[in-house]
Image (cartoon, grey):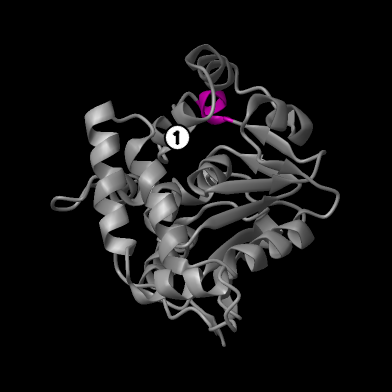
């Protein structure tokens, strides 16, 4: 199955693996307002699709994403109000959604980066569960170069990956660093000559596991990584109760007991 959510962001799904592609190559996939909406719409669409087992997020052309297209967005000052406005009881605004919503998807998300991954682009990648990169991809928390701070959910995602002093250094200096250095700092999961090929192999491996167990594993760590012991242990029990004796758990047991393989059913709500 294939579809296109917008001309800025393309979605295709095959064998349970969704490919989400930022598609503004002439601007290094810079974030203008249609791109903000295209990314958030893609995340919301895939969240509802229980057949999706894994998601690969990438960019066309010479870069993953060069960050905010500040020249285009600032042509209408009201755009900044639209980006920072937080509607109703939501905890995130539109600017934050492009990174944060990927954490809210049950299926694991793999960001494949190349070329440039600057500012908002890096924050989108940090919202994924995994980041596969070329060694020469350039990264930067670039906002201070423009007199700003990162405001696309980095305050949540970066703290899970590196110590506070290094986070402050990268944010205050806006310095560029390579994929190899990003791996050493913990920002990148794997360095690969062909990160897309490795991401596809990994996505296929994830697609072979129980989609309920994979989704519950993602939710478990997202909810407990900075939680108290009491809350972390409570989440373990709560999620385990939702998995035990359900269809996909019975299929997993059967598969590992030498019985003929049965396909897992679509992911249930946890």
- Residue lying farthest to the right in this orientation: 193
Q: Residue at x 52, y 28 (%)?
A: 146
| Residue 240 falls in image quadrant | bottom left
Q: Is residue 21 above or below residue 145?
A: below
Q: Which span of residues is magenta-colored?
A: 141-146
Residue matched to label 1: 154
Which one is nearer the viewer's eye here, 246 or 256?
256
Q: Residue at x 32, y 63 (%)?
A: 244
Within 10 Å of disc 1 (Cα), the crowding (few <14, some 14-19, many 20+) is many
Residue 217 visible in rendering: yes
Q: Quadrant of the N terminus?
A: bottom right
- Residue lying farthest to the left in this orientation: 88
Residue 188, given in percent of the width and then of the height, sits at 66, 38
Residue 92 visible in rendering: no
Which one is nearer the viewer's eye here, 194 or 31?
194
Q: Is residue 148 above or below residue 107?
A: above
Is 208 contained in the magenta span?
A: no
Residue 68, given in percent of the width and then of the height, sits at 52, 45
Residue 64, given in percent of the width and then of the height, sits at 67, 52
- On the rendered structure, is 178 left or right of 96? right
- On the rendered structure, is 80 left or right of 5? left
**Secondary structure type for disc 1:** helix
Tell me which secondary structure the magenta stretch mostly adopts.
Answer: helix
Residue 129, given in percent of the width and then of the height, sits at 53, 48
- On the rendered structure, is 43 left or right of 14? left
Q: Residue at x 20, y 50 (%)?
A: 90
Q: Is residue 46 above or below residue 126?
A: below
Q: Residue at x 34, y 37 (%)?
A: 224
């Amino acid at each position: 199955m294939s579809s296109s959510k917008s001309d800025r962001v393309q979605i295709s799904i095959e064998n349970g693996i969704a490919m989400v592609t930022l598609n503004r190559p002439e601007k290094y996939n810079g974030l203008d307002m249609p791109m903000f909406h295209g990314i958030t719409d893609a995340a919301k669409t895939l969240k509802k699709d229980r057949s999706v087992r894994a998601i690969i997020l990438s960019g066309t052309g010479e870069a993953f994403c060069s960050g905010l297209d500040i020249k285009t967005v600032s042509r209408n000052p009201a755009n900044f109000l639209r980006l920072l406005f937080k509607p109703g009881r939501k905890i995130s605004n539109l600017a934050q959604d492009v990174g944060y919503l990927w954490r809210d998807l049950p299926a694991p998300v793999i960001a494949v980066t190349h070329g440039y991954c600057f500012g908002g682009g890096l924050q989108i990648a940090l919202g994924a569960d995994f980041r596969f990169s070329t060694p020469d991809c350039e990264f930067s928390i670039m906002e201070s170069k423009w007199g700003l701070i990162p405001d696309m959910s980095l305050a949540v995602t970066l703290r899970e990956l590196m110590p506070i002093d290094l986070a402050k250094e990268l944010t205050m200096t806006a310095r560029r660093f390579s994929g190899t250095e990003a791996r050493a700092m913990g920002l990148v999961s794997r360095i690969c000559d062909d990160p897309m090929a490795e991401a596809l192999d990994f996505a296929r491996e994830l697609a072979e596991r129980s989609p309920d167990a994979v989704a519950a594993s993602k939710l478990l760590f997202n909810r407990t990584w900075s939680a108290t012991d009491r809350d972390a242990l409570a989440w373990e029990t709560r999620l385990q109760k939702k998995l035990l004796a359900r269809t996909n758990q019975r299929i997993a047991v059967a598969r590992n007991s030498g019985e003929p393989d049965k396909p897992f059913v679509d992911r249930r709500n946890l």
